[in-house]
């Protein structure tokens, strides 16, 4: 039996966001509906005639979802595809995304019945359409958390410059088994990895166990190392493109891993791509930052202040009580539970402008 086909019309500039929506819908329908997205790299096998494949899938589609964003609304392509589909008797349904209200569109799309995705209800409307048109009973169970994760996945491309995302290799956080903030002994909870697994389940975060001490989730690897030596504890290695989606996880970990024990501040380290150079000599860093209007931190003379965080440029190698790094990096101290990906990206942008972080330039 041939699967029902839904044709997805959109701007190529929105392909990553649309791919995420497609993946969410595929998860609810268990892949029993063919969602044709011409830009996803999967719907059209490499080497096939693109126009022929588009026309063929339009001919066998019963429904076309037209995703209208600020970018696609400026293009004539979605109007062409929508008109072609409508002329063939395909039901065309406009869907407003990324802040677009379909009620404000120009004809002919505003003459068609559609909806906006501005929350979980919009995502569930997609499932409702499939249930109605194909006589199915897929669960209309998307939550606001699903929608928030969708927003987070598209965050980097929409709000952060490509340069910043591309020069950061990864962000690392370590929650040590033992700490002495302010001279007070604090120990991590018993069975910390069990607490992490429970947190992931409670927040409906998809993950897989690689082994008893390693968890993989989207854009992050979580590890647990026993003992008291450098690096022991729970660590996270995070990809910059998924920092926003992992904000909730990051901000929940201190209270979960140390429970009632007060941990007012924590830190993370930002590692850059190998062709990015960092200025780490204290007096030179201080000079450039002073010229750019940065204040010195109250924590110590090597650190500086940026909004609610303190930071320093650490040379390689840098050895601390709880970690060993053999690469230069940006160390940031923040208030526990208040990690903000957007603030971090903003700080990196300022450091690039100040010449502290220097991306490689093509000749």
Image (cartoon, rainbow, N blue to C red):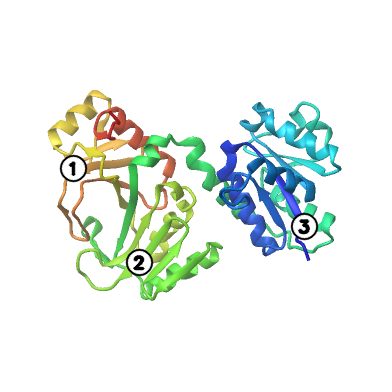
Picture residue at 19% right of the left edge, 36% below the top: 279
Residue 284: where, in percent of width, then height? 15, 31
Residue 142 figure quarter: bottom right
Quarter of the picture containing the N terminus is bottom right
How far separated are the C-alphas under marks 1 and 3? 63 Å
How far separated are the C-alphas under marks 2 and 1? 30 Å
Q: Which residue is labeled 1 in the image?
A: 300
Q: Is residue 180 above or below residue 114?
A: below
Helix, strand or loop at mark 3: loop
Q: Which residue is labeled 2 in the image?
A: 223
The answer to whether residue 91 is visible is yes
**Residues tagged 1 and 3 counted as in contact (Cβ below 8 A):** no
Picture residue at 56% right of the left edge, 63% below the top: 204
Picture residue at 63% right of the left edge, 42% below the top: 50
Residue 363: where, in percent of width, then height? 28, 28
Q: Earlier in the sequence, mark 2 or mark 1?
A: 2
How far separated are the C-alphas under marks 3 and 2? 42 Å
Say few, some or many: other residues with alpha carbon within 10 Å of mark 2 (under 14 / 14 to 19 / 20 or more).
many
**Residue 353: mark in rendering:** none
Residue nearer the viewer, 194 or 18: 18
Q: Earlier in the sequence, mark 1 or mark 3?
A: 3
Say few, some or many: other residues with alpha carbon within 10 Å of mark 3 (under 14 / 14 to 19 / 20 or more).
some
Q: Which residue is labeled 3 in the image?
A: 4
Residue 214: where, in percent of width, then height? 38, 69
């Amino acid at each position: 039996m041939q699967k029902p086909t839904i044709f997805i019309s959109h701007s190529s500039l929105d392909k990553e966001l649309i791919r995420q929506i497609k993946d969410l819908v595929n998860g609810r329908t268990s892949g029993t509906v063919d969602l044709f997205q011409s830009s996803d790299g999967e719907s059209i096998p490499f080497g096939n005639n693109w126009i022929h494949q588009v026309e063929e899938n339009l001919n066998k589609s019963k429904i076309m979802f037209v995703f209208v964003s600020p970018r696609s609304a400026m293009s004539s392509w979605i109007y062409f595809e929508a008109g072609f589909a409508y002329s063939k008797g395909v039901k065309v349904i406009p869907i407003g995304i990324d802040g677009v209200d379909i009620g404000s569109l120009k004809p002919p799309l505003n003459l068609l019945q559609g909806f906006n995705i501005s929350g979980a209800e919009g995502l569930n409307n997609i499932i409702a359409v499939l249930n109605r048109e194909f006589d199915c009973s897929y669960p209309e169970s998307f939550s606001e958390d699903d929608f928030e994760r969708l927003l987070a996945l598209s965050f980097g491309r929409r709000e952060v410059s490509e340069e910043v995302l591309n020069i950061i290799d990864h962000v690392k956080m370590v929650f040590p088994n033992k700490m002495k903030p302010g001279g007070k002994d604090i120990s991590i909870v018993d069975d910390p990895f069990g607490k992490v697994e429970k947190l992931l389940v409670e927040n409906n975060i998809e993950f897989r166990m690689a082994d008893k001490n390693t968890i993989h989730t989207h854009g992050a690897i979580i590890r647990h190392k026993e003992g008291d030596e450098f690096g022991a504890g729970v660590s996270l290695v995070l990809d910059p493109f998924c920092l926003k989606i992992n904000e909730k996880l990051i901000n929940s970990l201190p209270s979960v891993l140390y429970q009632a024990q007060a941990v007012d501040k924590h830190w993370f380290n930002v590692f850059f791509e190998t062709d990015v150079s960092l200025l780490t000599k204290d007096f030179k860093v201080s000079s450039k930052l002073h010229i750019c209007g940065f204040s010195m931190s109250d924590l110590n003379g090597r650190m500086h202040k940026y909004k609610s965080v303190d930071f320093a440029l650490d040379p390689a190698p840098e050895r601390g009580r709880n970690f060993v790094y053999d690469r230069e990096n940006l160390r940031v101290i923040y208030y526990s539970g208040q990690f903000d990906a957007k603030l971090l990206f903003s700080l990196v942008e300022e450091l690039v402008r100040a010449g502290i972080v220097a991306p490689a330039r093509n000749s």
